[in-house]
């Protein structure tokens, strides 16, 4: 609302009518594109913080484009141009008054005369403040009374700087309307000087930016939610990794069990992460010497990922170790593990393979619970051992698990693995890819060399799940 005291200034040059029309067209088209992206985002999972943040950004962009379009529309209405249907519709809107929610209904103006103590408000400002048109406009002294208490100093500082120091006003504050609703207003204005350079009055333009600020707050909240979720994910991932590293055997490289004597096993194992580093699952491998001189070999996998899976794996592996030390046979041991999962606070499904090797007789006793069978490599060829009956752990109560035996000979290579090793998206997946390594295993002198060949073949980023592999080579 420029003061009449500035009437001697030259009028600014307005942009061409066609140029404004072009800007309006491009703004509307961009607004439609952004709104389409926003609608697509609504169709996704509401619980995903990343998508909530993206949707909030789209909504904020739509608000900005709506405001820009209305500004350009107001500019066009004031431009000289041909009178057509568009102009007629604009005249009709002007006659009926600004539509609810339009720019014209969200922007009002005021002037306070310091010499006469008179206040002048536009009709739009009455609507913004929720006051009847026949009421008196608020004076500068009364204006702070409708502000939230914490925002009153902001208005006081703005008015003081304008009237005393002659500074332009530019700031925001919140008002409480008579109906109890709260609005956020952006206020700009300047002092109006008299002929002697003294402040005679003050004018201001007030814009209701409530919707815009709500959109910005939604973006801020959703962005904070994304950061919080990512922090939680990183923390849980780190804890899952630490728990897994604590539970899995501390030995690295090769292990000889028993340490002395004929028929010892040369053992090596490796954990292979999935292509997605965040998928820390419940895979395990273990090898340990039992009190009776025999050797325990085991691998397994529990459903799920993260801390729940690794903590359940720690519980199950601890139970398996304890029962193996107590001398329980592999078949009966699988049955007890099944009961452990059945009575667990957090029920889960799992697959497991438990082997017990007697170095004195070179006999391997083993049982499985819905798990890939071991592969036996001998003389440059390999085969899958026929699996005894056994279902997934936790799938059915009172399940019975059979046990089988196989005699091993010096130079034999036994490969135990979880199913994530061969479950890949390329054509090289499956047990056949493992059997193709038979010539390399025949040339290998240690279990560690065999593991190295496995990692080279299956350690690529295309693997869909994490996996464990354990190789045992029978010595002379």
Image: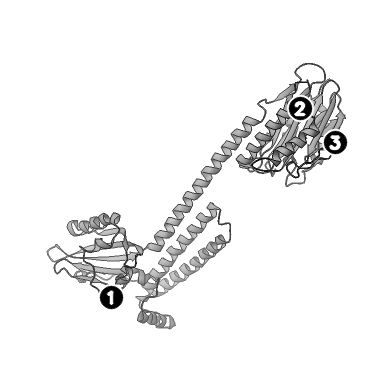
- Among numbered discs 2 and 1, the one appearing first in the sequence: 1
Coloring scheme used: one colour
Q: Nearer the viewer, mark 2 or mark 1?
A: 2
Q: Residue 279, image x and y in percent?
A: 63, 42
Q: Residue 48, image x and y in percent?
A: 56, 53
**Residues packed near mark 2 inside 10 Å, few (<14), some (14 to 19) or many (20 plus):** many
Position of the C terminus, as image quadrant, is top right
Dot 1 lies on which element? loop
Task: Find residue 308 and report its image quarter.
Answer: top right
* Observer-nearest of 42 and 369: 369
Tell me if 115 is positioned left or right of 266 in this view: left
Dot 2 lies on which element? strand
Tell me if 326 is positioned left or right of 382 in this view: left
- Among numbered discs 1 and 3, the one appearing first in the sequence: 1
Q: Which residue is mark 2?
A: 296
At x 76% / y 27%, what residue is drawn?
Answer: 296
Per the rendering, the mark at residue 385 is 3
Q: Which residue is mark 1?
A: 133
Q: Residue 17, image x and y in percent?
A: 39, 75
């Amino acid at each position: 609302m420029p003061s009449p005291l500035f009437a001697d200034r030259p009028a600014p040059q307005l942009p061409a009518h066609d140029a404004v029309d072009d800007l309006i067209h491009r703004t509307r088209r961009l607004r439609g594109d952004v709104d389409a992206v926003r609608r697509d985002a609504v169709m996704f999972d509401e619980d995903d913080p990343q998508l909530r943040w993206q949707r909030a950004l789209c909504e904020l962009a739509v608000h900005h484009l709506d405001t820009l379009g209305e500004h350009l529309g107001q500019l066009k209405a004031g431009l000289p141009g041909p009178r057509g249907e568009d102009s007629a519709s604009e005249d009709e809107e002007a006659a009926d008054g600004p539509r609810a929610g339009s720019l014209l209904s969200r922007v009002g103006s005021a002037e306070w005369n310091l010499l006469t103590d008179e206040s002048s408000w536009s009709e739009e400002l009455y609507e913004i403040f929720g006051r009847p048109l026949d009421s008196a406009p608020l004076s500068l002294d009364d204006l702070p009374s409708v502000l939230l208490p914490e925002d009153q100093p902001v208005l006081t500082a703005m008015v003081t700087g304008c009237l005393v120091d002659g500074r332009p006003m530019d700031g925001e504050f919140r008002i409480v309307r008579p109906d109890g609703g709260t609005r956020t207003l952006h206020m700009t204005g300047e002092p109006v000087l008299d002929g002697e350079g003294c402040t005679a009055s003050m004018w201001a333009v007030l814009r209701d930016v409530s919707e815009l600020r709500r959109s910005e707050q939604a973006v801020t909240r959703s962005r904070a939610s994304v950061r919080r979720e990512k922090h939680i994910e990183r923390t849980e991932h780190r804890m899952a990794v630490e728990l897994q590293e604590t539970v899995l055997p501390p030995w690295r490289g090769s292990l000889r069990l028993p340490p002395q004597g004929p028929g010892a096993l040369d053992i090596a194992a490796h954990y292979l992460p999935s292509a997605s580093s965040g998928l820390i699952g419940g895979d395990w491998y273990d090898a340990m010497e039992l009190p009776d001189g025999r050797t325990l070999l085991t691998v397994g996998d529990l459903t799920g990922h993260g801390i729940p899976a690794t903590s359940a794996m720690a519980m199950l592996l601890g139970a398996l170790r304890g029962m193996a030390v107590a001398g329980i046979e592999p078949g009966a041991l699988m049955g007890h593990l099944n009961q452990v999962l059945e009575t667990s606070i957090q029920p889960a499904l799992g697959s497991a393979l438990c082997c017990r090797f007697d170095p004195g007789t070179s006999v391997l006793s083993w049982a499985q619970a819905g798990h890939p069978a071991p592969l036996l490599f001998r003389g440059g060829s390999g085969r899958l051992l026929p699996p005894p009956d056994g279902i997934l752990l936790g799938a059915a109560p009172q399940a019975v698990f059979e046990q089988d035996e196989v005699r091993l000979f010096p130079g034999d290579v036994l490969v135990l693995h979880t199913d994530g090793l061969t479950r890949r998206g390329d054509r090289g997946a499956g047990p056949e890819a493992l059997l193709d390594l038979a010539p390399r295993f025949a040339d290998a002198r240690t279990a560690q060399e065999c593991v190295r060949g496995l990692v080279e073949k299956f350690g690529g980023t295309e693997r869909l799940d994490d996996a464990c592999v354990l190789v045992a080579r029978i010595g002379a």
